[in-house]
Image (tube, grey):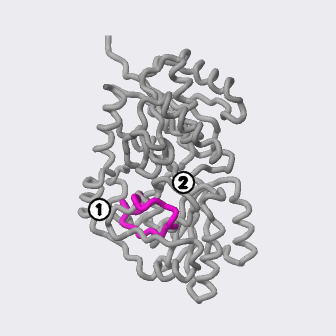
Amino acid sequence: MENKPVRVLQVLGSLSHGGAETMVMNYFRKINTSEIQFDFLVHKRVVEGYEAEILARGGRIFYIDTLRQSGLFRYIYNIVGILKNKGPFVAVHAHTDYQSGVVALAAKIAGIQKRICHSHSTNPPTRLTKVLMPTFSLVANTFGNHKIACGVEAGNFMFRGKSFAVLNNAVDINRYSHKNFEQSNRIRKALNIPSDGFVLGHIGRFVPLKNHRFLIEFINYLHLKGRKVYLILVGDGPLKSDIEKQVELMGLGSYIKFLGVRDDIPEIFSTMDVFLLPSFSEGIPMVVIEGQAAGKPSIVSNSVPTEVDLGLGLVSFASVSEGFQVWSDLLDSSIINNDSAQIERIFMEKGYNIDLNIKKMEEIYLT
């Protein structure tokens, strides 16, 4: 009888095109599915997420209410039920940051031997979370027997002095390794942007943490200075309608384009001249790694860990409180890097090549 692949349950907040979700999908596309199959446990259904691709690749998707909606005991009960009734699973891999220890606790109750807590963040999202963080960290350290982080700062934030491994937010460099002029021109034409227009870009959910208001005000500042730049915004989220209203009130509707959720991110990067990320907090943002893979310069807030800079001369840091002129000056000094051989070499040396990291991932699951 042919051996079936072992199954790993990936636990995520949703299957949107966010950073952690994109990272998991990068691995799912590359992993040896004759040996390992991914299934997904998520809390929220989304439109235009990764659901269809997951199902096409043989993965299963299970939905449960969040910890807050369920309460602690019901949440654990629901996870245990899935693990016992839908398995067997060789491992549970939780990407729910500060709540990942609760997932690991449920996995231990269900008898799962490999319980992976994966930190993708460097900052608690609410004041209550900050107060409870020592408890969340204790639970993760107690019940997670494999501790992973996207970077050193994210690991120190979550695991607080305990040992952990760093697994980089790697990308498939081949998808970004050259500027696709044909795709760039197609997207610009569809958005009514001149082929020679200077395009800034941002990819991220419309939530307070991402600081979209800074982006809109920055574009307005540049226009008042006589610079008719364009801004493309990729993503969705609860603040999107508010930002759209702000754009209209400022009369910038012709210059700021809302693209919604997209699955052609490499092509979107080919359309940009500079990527902007003025977030108040980040782990190791996947989008900045992708930007460097595409050879595009990024200007990011100094709340982003410096680990994200791979040394290609493409990442600049600035405070969102320094004023727009600082960001404008960095914009002027930003240079695109079209040396695909150098980019590929640096990604390999820094451990951001997907093929290298797949081996690490498979070793965790199979040994």
* Residue placed under numbered mark 1 in the picture: 343
Q: Which amino acid is tagged 2? A: Arg
Label 1: which secondary element: helix
The residue sitting at 34% across, 70% down in the picture is 313
Q: Which amino acid is tagged 1? A: Ile
Q: CA distance from mark 2 to mark 1?
A: 24 Å
Viewer-side residue, 159 vs 222: 159
| Image vertical order of residue 133 relative to residue 227, above or below | above
Residue 253 placement (x, y as % from top left): 67, 73
Residue 305 placement (x, y as % from top left): 45, 59
Viewer-side residue, 74 vs 105: 105
Label 2: which secondary element: loop
| Image vertical order of residue 226 relative to residue 315, above or below | below
- Left or right: residue 155 compared with residue 176: right
Q: Quadrant of the N terminus?
A: top left
* Residue placed under numbered mark 2 in the picture: 262
How busy is the neighbourhood of tag 1: few (under 14 within 10 Å), some, or many (20 plus)?
Answer: many
Magenta extent? 290-308
Residue 254 placement (x, y as % from top left): 64, 75
- Marker count (numbered): 2
How busy is the neighbourhood of tag 2: few (under 14 within 10 Å), some, or many (20 plus)?
Answer: some
The residue sitting at 55% across, 39% down in the picture is 96
Cβ–Cβ below 8 Å for labels 2 and 1? no
Disc 2 or 1, which lies upstream in sequence?
2
